[in-house]
Image (tube, rainbow, N blue to C red):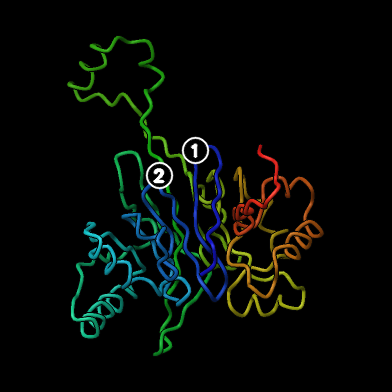
Amino acid sequence: MTAPAEFEYDAIRLRGVSLAGEESYIVAPEMNLGFDIGRCQRDVLGVDHLFLTHGHMDHAAGAAYYFSQRMFIDNAPGNVYAPEPIVEPLRRLMGIWADIDGHEPPANIHPVAPGQDIPLRRDLIVRPFYVNHLCRRHDRSRVDALGFAAIEVRHKLLDEFTGLAGNELVDLKKRGVEITRRVEMPVVTYCGDSADGEFFDLDYVKNARVLLMECTFVDRDDRERARAGYHTHLLDLRGILPRLNNERILLTHLTRRTNLRDARAALKNELDASMLERISFFMEHRRRPRKAAQPGDAEE
């Protein structure tokens, strides 16, 4: 399997693999969540909440393995959140694997819909939203893909109560006075597979500290191919990036037919320097393997 990339920015750490048609998953270990499942590498097993954008094999193939291995290592079952139309097929898949394997592990598979927040902690929610990527089932029915935003929730004291003593604040709360306001701080937003769309104008997309967005195709000759599959082409970024305020933008889902060196060169050629300061390909952030010591090497 492809070695995972690991990206760190301030207190945000993301680890995963994203290669078009092969495997896509991103986990945020400190938030105990992940986006997509890929083939379920070890990183995926370590988080309790996985948010599945759509049912394509490179994003969802490891779903049954996730629950099976969680049971095998005596972990709680974990949770997979998926677009409603694919929840029952995922549950049937678990039953089919039980017929093959002999055991059906406990599996928490939850339907989710755009705008319906999923609380993970008192201070952390995940918000689904529609993206511009269509999936077709065998009966040709349409399944819309989702993106997900991990949002920190804080409650700040209203200005008019600043300076009051603790006992005064407690007294106000007992009397039913609202003394705080809810503040949402989008931390990481994952768009999964998607072409350009209005979702980029959502506050929790354009203002997330870190945005993971697709860029599958780089070659100019592939622009129509990108549009036909509801994917993003490098040339589309010129119309998308000016709408975004993210501190860092990570491009995912690059096709393996394009090596990272060529992709970086194309990015530099097509984008202004001001845009390049905050954007990179997620898979650039792989750690190089440590070189084995050779006889005669000086000690550091």
Q: Would residue 160 appear left or right of 241 to someone viewing this image?
A: left
- Binning the other alpha carbons within 10 Å of mark 2 as few (below 14), some (14 to 19) or many (20 upward) gives few
User: How many numbered discs, if any?
Assistant: 2
Q: Is residue 289 above or below residue 186?
A: below
Residue that extends furthest to the bottom in the rendered view of this protein: 139
Find out whether the residues at labels 2 and 1 contact each other: C-beta distance under 8 Å: yes
User: Which residue is rendered at x = 41% and y = 84% of the image?
Assistant: 137
Query: Helix, strand or loop at disc 1?
Result: loop
The disc placed on residue 11 is 1
- Residue extending farthest front: 296
Give the x, y percent position of residue 148.
44, 57
Left of 41 or right of it: where is 178? left
Position in image of residue 76 (x %, y %): 22, 57
Query: For residue 221, what is the image quadrant?
Result: bottom right
Residue at 23% from the left image edge and 64% from the top image edge: 71
Q: In the picture provided, is 242 more to the left or to the right than 175?
A: right
Q: Is residue 269 above or below residue 106?
A: above
Q: Which mark is residue 30?
A: 2
Residue 15: x and y, percent? 49, 54
Camera-nearest residue between 223 and 248:
248
Q: What is the three-letter code of the residue carrying label 2?
A: Glu
